Image: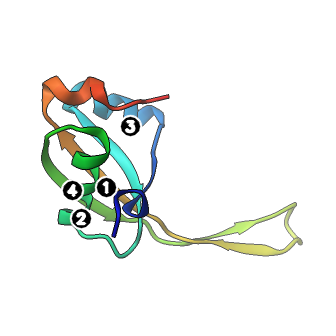
């Protein structure tokens, strides 16, 4: 897979900002079939940084009610996230907004 096929987007939440500031870890949403080696290569080639480690997490799908109690229920699919720990001096190379 190519770099832009592996990484879908950067996850920007309050918790992910705390990880960036405290632990030099950036959270990415990635394709379900990507493994840690592909994620490492994609981040290093796309942003020009050195990666220390990669941890992955697959969230479960959930049912969501749309427009009230008697409306239809929609299944929201699960996503795969990658927590990528980056060298301290390279953290500024990743665009966060």
Q: Secondary structure at mark 1?
A: strand
Which residue is identified by label 2?
Answer: 38
Instruction: From the image, state whether disc 3 or disc 2 is nearer to you.
Output: 2
Binning the other alpha carbons within 10 Å of mark 1 as few (below 14), some (14 to 19) or many (20 upward) gives: many
Quarter of the rendering containing residue 41: bottom left
Between circles 4 and 3, the one closer to the viewer is 4
State the residue position of label 1: 82
Disc 4 or 3, which lies upstream in sequence? 3
Name the secondary structure under disc 4. Answer: helix
List x then y, in percent, for residue 65.
76, 66
The tag earlier along the polypeptide, 1 or 4, is 4
Q: Position of residue 68 (x, y in %)?
A: 86, 61
Dot 3 falls on a residue whose secondary structure is helix
Seen in the picture, residue 25 relative to 9 is either above or below; the reply is: above
Q: Which mark is residue 16?
A: 3
| Color style of the picture | rainbow
Label annotation for residue 41: 4
Q: Which numbered disc flags the more N-terminal residue, 3 or 2?
A: 3
Q: Residue at x 24, y 64 (%)?
A: 38
Q: CA distance from mark 4 to mark 3?
A: 21 Å
Mark pair 1, 4: CA separation: 13 Å
What is the crowding at mark 4: few (fewer than 14 residues within 10 Å), some, or many (at least 20)?
A: some
Looking at the image, is 38 positioned above or below residue 97? below
The spot of residue 73 in percent (x, y) is 76, 74
Give left or right: position of 92 versus 75.
Answer: left
Earlier-in-chain disc, 2 versus 1: 2
Badges 4 and 2: C-beta atoms under 8 Å apart? yes
Q: Residues under labels 4 and 2: Cα distance?
A: 5 Å
* Mark 1 or 3, nearer chain start: 3
Distance (Cα) linking label 1 and label 3: 11 Å
Location of the N terminus (image quadrant)? bottom left
């Amino acid at each position: 897979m190519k770099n832009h096929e592996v990484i879908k987007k950067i996850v920007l939440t309050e918790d992910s900002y705390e990880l960036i500031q405290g632990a030099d870890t950036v959270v990415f949403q990635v394709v379900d079939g990507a493994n840690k080696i592909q994620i490492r290569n994609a981040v290093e080639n796309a942003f020009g940084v050195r990666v220390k480690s990669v941890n992955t997490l697959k969230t479960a799908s959930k049912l969501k009610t749309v427009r009230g109690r008697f409306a239809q229920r929609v299944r929201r699919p699960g996503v795969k996230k990658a927590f990528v720990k980056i060298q301290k001096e390279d953290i500024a190379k990743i665009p966060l907004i």
